[in-house]
Amino acid sequence: MGKCCFGVDVGGTTVKMGLFTPDGDLLEKWEIPTRTEDQGSHIISDIAEAIERKITEAGLVRDDIIGIGVGVPGPVDKNGVVLQAVNLGWGIVDLGSELGKATGFPVKAGNDANVAALGELWKGGGKGYDDMVLVTLGTGVGGGIIVNGKMVVGVNGAGGEIGHIHLEDNETEACGCGNFGCLEQYASATGIVRLAKRKLAAVDTPSSLRSTEVSSKTIWDAVKAGDALAVEVAEEFGDYLGKGLSIIAAICNPKVFVLGGGVSKAGDILITYVQKYYEKYAFHASRDALFRLAVLENDAGIFGAAKLILE
Amino acid sequence: MGKCCFGVDVGGTTVKMGLFTPDGDLLEKWEIPTRTEDQGSHIISDIAEAIERKITEAGLVRDDIIGIGVGVPGPVDKNGVVLQAVNLGWGIVDLGSELGKATGFPVKAGNDANVAALGELWKGGGKGYDDMVLVTLGTGVGGGIIVNGKMVVGVNGAGGEIGHIHLEDNETEACGCGNFGCLEQYASATGIVRLAKRKLAAVDTPSSLRSTEVSSKTIWDAVKAGDALAVEVAEEFGDYLGKGLSIIAAICNPKVFVLGGGVSKAGDILITYVQKYYEKYAFHASRDALFRLAVLENDAGIFGAAKLILE
């Protein structure tokens, strides 16, 4: 069968796993449940067993396996030590070393958002570039910064925490992180709903959003239908996110921004609103950045994890 | 004499040059004038001649020379191509290749602010760390981002343009770059003077600044003397700069911020005001960053340039 590696994306509910060729062909993917009980102490052995089982099933021999890359929902330092992963019940866990011992294979680990960025760079929306920023617009706003083809991990594993860029001095509600005015409060799925609800309460403009559940999907559907109030919300959303990305560009001058997560299901119309404000705020030398939609969806994590061990 | 290398920092008035050991000992430093006439077409040959002269003077042989690193006041791409250097009269100049041909030695080139950051990392305020941000508070605000010991150059050589982070939506005066509300408009030497003049015009509070020329130096002297209005200006300055640095930290999570340039001559009191607001705005995982004053002053460029060729 030739050389292979595993890409593992550990989430709070399931562990996604993939078997890859070194060229990035995904041979098989599957999931196992994440057992978060007992401070998540079964997770590592569950992953190790699933890998051993797959090796046997696939008729592989141990020498075929290059190693295992893993993405984890929390800060991970440059040595593969998880500093905390609340959703897994983990405090400090030396994942590289422990999963290495449990399997006998080389292991590399990283933060799940950073690892997903590496996946989108390798086989997704950032393919062909070396300097990319993944912006994941989900329940929160996450991201991963890629400079010269490598993840920016940072000294505490907190590189790419772009949801917590301070953008608004006048915010009165706290962000989940405890600060006020973070990008995440405006550009996440919950953020755009907040913007819409504030707008609906502040003005009397008729809108289809007054007679439906307000969600990222219904807002963008209304924008596409030309609903004037929804368009105002999209402009406000684009202003915050475009401004935030212009700031990232002044710092690391990427070639391409890749937009992923639930909000990005709105499609190309999202890029229209974000890029317009990006170009307004960006420093001239970084104004020509490209905007792309993410393409790997939930597989970005396993692709990036596999790439991590192949570097 | 053993192996040596040259570090060259090209400015609009003088070219600073240094002869270094591979360990970073500065053996000699000197300057030549920057001849900007004829679209700066003499600069490269002047540098080449100065290097040849120094090799002879110092009794070196050509085999002793590892190479030449150069910092230039403008964007420089990853291949050592200068994209523009207005102060030198240069458009696109393939400096790596042209100075290489003129001297016969390997050449590496980078943007002067990024190269200075590498110098401060190697032998200055960031010594001992791998993840550092240099913040140069001069006429403008420049900077250099170091991730894993390497400069963040960016795709157009515009990495580390931190003076042009957008921070203020309500600004009515344009920044030199044409945008409104850039960090540089508040945190540079001219920026803090603007803040002070606005404050002096807006309120009647007595202040020593009403009877002197308002400069970065007189403002910080007044702060140290307890002048209430000057202290308000320092708080406002610290709020803008601390906020800007907290945003950088959310993106690349450095271990240390090194503050240099003319404004940093204020000394440790500068750090007091910046760190206070940094900690207010920073995401918890990056809140523990260190703050240091730059130590190499005008030599940061030649040190960083030498390091560039030693990497």
Image (tube, coloured by chain):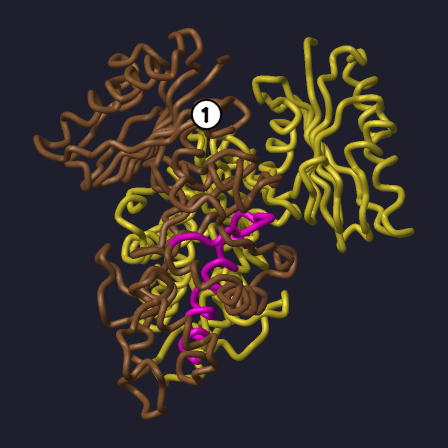
Chain colours: A yellow, B brown
Label 1 crowd bin: few (<14), some (14–19), many (20+), radius 10 Å: many
Closer to the camera in the image, B15 or A295: B15
Residue at 36% across, 35% down: B155
The answer to whether residue B118 is visible is yes
User: In the rendered structure, which amino acid carries the disc numbered 1?
Assistant: Phe
Task: Give whichever of A174, A12 is nearer the camera.
Answer: A174
Q: Main secondary structure of the magenta part?
A: helix
Give how far across and how far down residue B96 sits, in percent: 31, 21
Within the image, what quadrant is residue A115 found in?
Answer: top right
User: In x, y percent, where is residue B195?
Assistant: 33, 74
- Identify the residue at horizontal 32%, vertical 19% (top origin): B54
Q: Residue furthest right?
A: A38
Tell me if I can see residue A215 in this picture. no
Q: Which is nearer the eye, B59 or A91? A: B59
Q: Is residue A77 left or right of residue A172?
A: right
Q: Which residue is mark 1?
A: B20
Give coordinates of residue A116: x percent, y percent.
Answer: 58, 39
Q: Is residue B239 magenta?
A: yes
Check the residue under mark 1 and report the chain it is in.
Answer: B
Q: How many marks?
A: 1
Residue lying at the far left of the rendered structure: B38
Rendering quarter of residue A31 = top right
In the image, is residue A162 above or below residue A27?
below
Q: Is residue B105 above or below residue A229?
A: above
Residue at 51% x, 67% y: name it: B269
Relative depth, front residue between A112 and B274: B274
User: Bounds of the magenta span?
Assistant: B232-261
Identify whether B233 is placed above or below B6. Answer: below
Secondary element under disc 1, as helix, strand or loop, is strand
Q: In the rendered structure, does residue B184 fall within the stretch colored magenta?
A: no
Q: Is residue A304 left or right of residue B48?
A: right
